[in-house]
Amino acid sequence: MLKYIIKRLLMLIPVLIGVSIIVFVIMRVFSPDPAPIVLGQHATVEMANAWREVNGLNAPLHIQYFNFIKGVITGDLGHSYYTKTPVLEEIFARFPATIELAVSSILFASLFGIIIGAISAVKKNSVFDSAGMVTALIGVSMPIFWLGIILIIIFSGTLHILPSGGRADPLLQPATVTGFFLIDSLLTGNLQSFADTLVHLILPSCALGMYSMAIIARMTRSSMLETLEQDYIRTARAKGVTEGRVIRRHALRNALIPIVTVIGLQFGSLLGGAVLTETVFSWPGIGAYTVNCILKSDFPVVQGVVMLVAITFVIINLIVDVIYAFLDPRIKYSKKEA
Amino acid sequence: MENNTDNISAIQTTEVLEKPESQLREMWASLISNKGAVAGLIIIAILTFVAIFGKWLMPYDPNYSDMAISFQPPSTAHWFGTDQLGRDIFSRIIDGTHISLTVGLSAVAISLTIGTILGAVAGYRGGKTDAVIMRFMDMMLAIPSILLAIAFMAALGKGIDKAVIAIGLVSIPEYARIVRGCILSVKENDYVQAAKVVGNKDVRIVFKHIVPNILSSIVVRATLGISTAVLDTSALGFLGLGVQPPFAEWGDMLGRARGFIFSAPHTLVFPGIAITITVLAFNLLGDGLRDALDPKSRKI
Amino acid sequence: MNTVKRVFCVVLATVLLCLTFTACGSRQQSPTQASTDTLIFAQGAEPRGLDPALVDDGESSKVIVNIYEGLLKYAKDSTKLEPCLAESWDVSKDGLTYTFHLRKGVKFHDGTDFNAEAVKFNIERQMKGKATQDMSYADFVYGYVTKVEAVDEYTVVITLKDVCTPFLYNLAMSIAAPMVSPKALQDNNNNVNEHPVGTGPYKFVRWDKDQAVVLVRNDDYWGEKAKTKNVIFKIIKDNSARVVALNNGEVDMIDGIDATVVDQITKAGNVVDQPDGMNINYMAYNTTSPIFSKPENRKAFSQAINVPELVKSLYQGYASPADSILPSFVPGFAKDVKQVAYDPEAAKAALAKAGITSVHMITYSNPRPYNTATGQALAEAVQGYLSKVGVTCNIEVFDWTTYKQKIKAGDYDICFYGWTGDNGDPDNFMALLSDKDPTMNVARYDNPQYNELIAKGKATPEGPERDDIYAQLEKIQADQNPWLLVSHSKLLSAYSPKVQGYYYHVTGNVFLSGMSKNK
């Protein structure tokens, strides 16, 4: 297993090199010139040229790429063109917000997805089953951003019970330790801040988690149904084990294996969905920020973010595979890729 | 882009050993016994009809703006009301059907074609070719597809054609992976081996024997892929990267209505419903197809 | 089997977590609502930075004016000049030497003294040769300066290379002109974007990226101390969400709103503020294109568009149709100048005669301060009018960055643009039509008579003679129509009735030190 993990981590290197080339080409070859936006209303052609010279954008492409890679290796991703702040600083000021949102969405999605799916399977063909599955179907068909706006209209604009956006009340924000507000507020013993953070998380988590919840519900239902038909379940029933116990101890347990995989896969895709959710909810995360930077041609930031996200994505995939193997001993990793 | 790795279909590289024709016929029979799939088919038929004959169904020119009647709520004259520029939203939704379906289908056509070719080559040739192609696909998968599509759009500029390219390109790896997976499982079958022994050319073997066999998985994937593409298009439109004006695109309509959610909520409700219904229809059909294809899930 | 137990534990924990969620949800009350010692202002975008020399955006300058001050400042309701860190100033007869007498006893937030050396340091930092490329306003504000001398502790003498009447106006701007602590600049590698130190009524506390900038009262302020202790600039990007936040009492003041939400805000009992803004929103004809090199074609197009109706429906009364380039409160504003009147019949005849059936239009997708409805909506509205006189428009829309490149490339018949005044001087607006840079002069207009008058206006000292020059320039524009003037947009902001002393300056800045909040 360890050997397999090391091998997978080594495979990260060519993937990262490839990713860096893709991003580099899209940004530097095809994207608009950043100089006018950096220099603003009074920029002249000469000023723009001088600025490009200083920032190495007049050099041949391969030299630019070489400089970029040199930076990556020495841990220097450069400065944002627009704010002049080091890229890593900009990224790490926002990354925890996105992770916190993604984790809370996946918790929301797993919890309700498993509950809805399990009940639907047990009460197959009942009203609940149909209702649950119709909800799941609509859940995968609604655009995230539309759902988000509708939630804001209902819970914030009409009922006034939940905040419309943002991550926390600025005055209640916990002291920064890890950057994750839920953890920080507990570490500093600030319960009011913990509650405030939770309240701010509800709507964005629902919007972002809805799609995954629907997928997980459907997955849970079908894998539970499959398990319920297995011989050992029939045996357990025949032995007089109560129905509730059969479902909890036997059916759900075995159905969990494929569900965990799906949850893992969903987590990776949430990073993408975060772009839209963050835009709608003014969430101070990396997704909405990156879109902004793409539109401003802030090359160093976009390059940095994409590299970081690629690493995260690959690592999450690895973790999913490892958990999968851990849960289901039948799977052994051979030399073939997983 | 919502999620690509959805559903179980990616996992189940179904054993497809029957003759393709009979298999398709059986699929169809099972499909029309599935209520959801039939509903999906009917909605798609209606949408297609609207997309083709929409010009004659619209009560107004969708791009005609009359500033004197901006932001009218729904009424008998304007069923869905009017937007900021006094354009009839009902007509614009109808007009948007055409764009959404066109983008959805063309984007899937692009990713399907390129993905199938890449996946087929990788799976059939194996070895170094396989490694190179699939590593490249891994790289693309490691970048969230929405960021990739946004970057493409930012680089290419607005336009339907560009949206098609951006959305088509980012979903190539999925198809490549599925096709490669199918091919690996079909390749070792007796009749393929036999064809090889008889001395058929590689290309001929791939298209004559292997492609028909993996057709069904691809059809399922592509149907679900259309729904993803429609969602992606609307997401790009919502972020202001969609079509050139004055074309009506649902996501674009939503993005521009966003500033008016309290003063003119009708501008926001209808495009959202249109997107949801379209995506839902393709999801229903895709699910039906998958169930029809996979006898195991059919029982359930 | 342990695994399964663990998984169940996780699920159980999640259930508990979610119960907490819903439990807090129903009875949550924002604590900042109650406190009267904190003012929260929500804006639509993050400041670019807090170093006045390194930014060019309104979102930054709103924060900057509360931390920093310049030598001069604007009056509360106009762009008239008033003393600030300079108590008085003298201009030499030839208009080339300015002597500033500084206020005594002023300290920067880091405890260092504000004096002549600090002024010299701040200006020299932005002079030619020393300024870095991304100090985008350095040339605009200090381009004419050749020498800065600290004559004594509180006297500074600035020498210009040429007469430049707008120079004094520049020194009151919120960009480039505010004075930064030289020590802070030395400590932070000549970039105080994230470590601002000024002399103003508020001190910087912290900046949570994409969330909020937090300031606290400067208790050692030289003037009247700020009324409210804490100030937070909260970043809420979505326009509707910002409105909801105000109506829910999460924030006290917001800006960056458009006309459509005004009802929503007033219904909730909040107040909308709408002074005229220092801006112009216009459509430019490319005077180097085959169609629009002829003034009569420009006139015919202008006749085809019903500007008052368009402005009314597009901006719902929160912008006024523009009859002159200059807003009414800027010196040099000419009351009697009128633009071409709406006359679709005449336009149709003229266009049919000239055989013009289609034009190529480019526009921008973003809302701009002078055009909250976005360039796309404006272009589509114009397209509607032109279709009525038999002209089809091919519109291309670009995001702002790309748009500027397209403007530079010059492949268009018509484009949309606008200008937000920098310093309240008429030259700042009128000189656009004589600028050599095509990204400034988007009509690519080149009229020797116009250019001559611009040069004359720049060298003439303030007074009726100078005002008359700008009135003449307005008249040339109205006759020749290189632009179709659309509107002057109002500066829409809104605040809770609890806030006392609210005002939004014509430059788009909010000075919070005079505001307070009732229970």
Image (cartoon, rainbow, N blue to C red):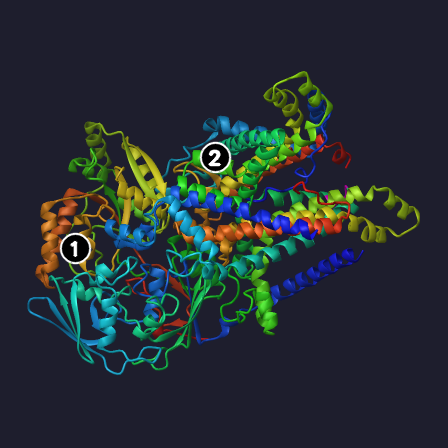
Left-right relation of B137 to C52: right
Residue B261 seen in the figure: yes
Give the residue pinned by disc 1: C335
Q: Who's the residue at 56% across and 53% down the image?
A: A151
**Quadrant into which the C terminus of chain B falls:** top right
Nearer to the camera, A43 or C211: A43
Left or right of A172 in this view: C205:
left
Q: Which residue bears the numbered disc 2?
A: B164
Going by the numbered disc 2, the residue's amino acid type is Val
- Which residue, as the protein is rendered here, is positioned at the far right? A239
**Image: C424 above or below C358:** below
| Chain designation of label 2 | B
Residue at screen point 50% across, 46% down: A17
Can I make out residue A150 in this image? no
C95 lies above or below C321: below
- Magenta range is A125-129
Is residue C479 part of the magenta span, yes or no? no
Per the model, the C-alpha gap separating discs 2 and 1 is: 52 Å
